[in-house]
Amino acid sequence: MSDPNLVRFRSVVAAALAELEARRQEVNDLNVFPVADGDTGDNMVLTLRAVLVELDRLAGGGDRTIDEIGREEIVESVARAALLGARGNSGVILSQLIRGAAEELASRPGELVDPVLIGAALAKGSDRAYQSVRDPAEGTILTVAREMAHRIVTELAHTPEARQSAYGDPTEQNEAIAAVLERAVAAGRDSVERTPDLLPVLREAGVVDAGGHALTVIFAGIVAALRGAEPPPLERRAPARVTHPEHQSSTYRFCTNFAVTGHELEPSRFHAPLETLGDSVLVVGDAATLKVHLHTDDPETAMRVFDGVGDVSRLDVADMRAQIGHRAARLAGEEDGAASVRTQCGALAVVAGEGMRELYESLGVHALDGGATLNPSTYELLAGIHEVPSEEVVVLPNSPNVIMAAERAAELSDKRVRVVASRSPQAGLAVAVALDTTREAEHNAKAMEAALGRVRTGAVAPAARDDGQGRFREGEAVGFVDDDLCAWGAPEPTLRSVLEALAGEAELVTCLAGDQPPLGPEQVRSLMPAGVELEYAAGGQPRYWWLLAAE
């Protein structure tokens, strides 16, 4: 890139990201190794996006040139941004490809970025990526990167005119680089075709390697940007067969990623203790910053490995069992195959009952199954936050018992997260309508908290045990307004009392019927005081016959 303007460099990265974004779901659907969790495209997109954000920061909103900023600062900042933004195996390996290439560029101050330097940078990136993996598997992105680099370096070694003059025409220089990278794309395409021969799990699933294919897509986008034309053609890949084999990491639940910052950090010393907690362990970085990835059932213990060593931050936890289930359902045609649309802010609600899930999702809110007791762990909440396709999230705990775990998850998450202290599913549902996906989490949280102040809640449930004061026996109806017991006895008069208490100053009462309530919808409507609208829906929640909210 002979143009000294950083905007030109940014445009190349942006084009690579745009090309990968356009084929992200295609890449996800190829993903079967090391776990068929269907997120390779997502993880590599996030890594590239972090690089783009860092370039914008370096540019400072102006037209600062590469020389003004300094090549060394640019490559160091870009490498660190890729490292911190990486998620999953594929994202971490891509970050190391970027880091190795950046190190090569930084080691040659003053040299023009021409085909020879591009070849050397790709070779260094490949070496760095291989070094990051304890047990490199052939037939993966590692193989594809190596063979792309080998093709460039070999061809340039027999091309005397490969080195370019710094005084040449910029368009001609860009075309020379594009021509070299186009040959790299062709080499990558050939390498991708061979990946099923090298990795049996790919052959059994009927796919090529997802990460390797994504790498060729990225380079095709770069070629397109350099030429101002369409990218080199790459075949659209069919998704993996649904009947994919089980892989070794299926025994672990959480794909866990976090950063560690400190002094004199040595990646290799942490591999052994982390491998006692799970598999697919990657620890990469430098003496000041590490990025850790592993599959484990115990993210908290994994983070404790770094107690006293450095500060842990940017935690991201994904539930691989849920991911594998969603992917299998999508490929079987049971779910919409369209990629989730990323927004500024999304929301996560803790729910119980399929009907309740559907009600929240109809409002654009992601639902996390909290079980019959509505009591998910901090790491289940983190996994739920991960699934929301936005970098900012509002969490609705929907139970007093979940608020503390939700706040802890918000502290740990690498996303910007706000917790709105909803104490019941019906209260959360009433305020979820305030979600504006185009606004920041802070704005949405304030709007929901204001709405929460205007909501009163009620509930009617069968008593779990006899009352110590003799007011009711096990199985009889008990009614609550907010947290206060206000009625008991038969279901009909108990529900009537709660509805009358809630309807006093309300315009609308929402009634969410649980699993097998003793009264039908019309019987419930007949108990509603005159002049107040009733909105009735099937929540399907356990334990409670009816959950009520008055606005």
Image: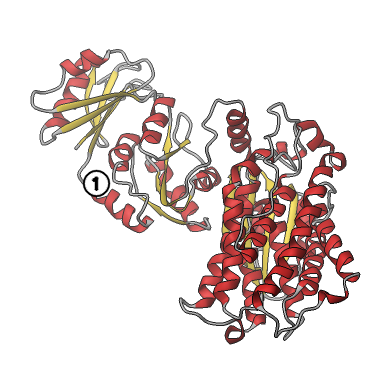
Way the structure is coloured: secondary structure
Q: Position of residue 29 (x, y in %)?
A: 65, 38
Question: On the image, which quarter does residue 156 sit in?
Answer: bottom right
Report the residue at 85% width, 48% height from top: 138
Q: Is residue 2 left or right of residue 354?
A: right
Report the residue at 27% width, 52% height from top: 447
Farthest residue in the right direction?
158
| Residue 539 drawn above or below residue 260 | above
Name the quarter where the C terminus is drawn: top left
**Within 10 angstroms of label 1, few (less than 14), some, or many (20 or more) residues?**
some
Farthest residue in the left direction?
531
Question: On the image, which quarter does residue 184 sit in?
Answer: bottom right
| Residue 121 drawn above or below residue 443 | below
Q: Of 195 and 490, which appears nearest the observer?
A: 195
Q: Of 454 and 148, which appears nearest the observer?
A: 148
Which residue was labeled with disc 1? 451
Q: Position of residue 269 (x, y in %)?
A: 79, 64
Report the residue at 76% width, 61% height from top: 270
Q: Kindly tell me whether residue 65 is visible in this rendering.
A: yes
Name the quarter where the N terminus is drawn: bottom right
> What amino acid type should be assigned to the residue bearing mark 1?
Ala
Q: How many marks?
A: 1
Q: Position of residue 457 (x, y in %)?
A: 25, 35
Badge 1 element = helix
Q: Kindly tell me whether residue 300 is visible in this rendering.
A: no
Q: Is residue 339 left or right of residue 108?
A: left
Q: Position of residue 22 (x, y in %)?
A: 57, 48
Q: Of 408 and 382, which appears nearest the observer?
A: 382
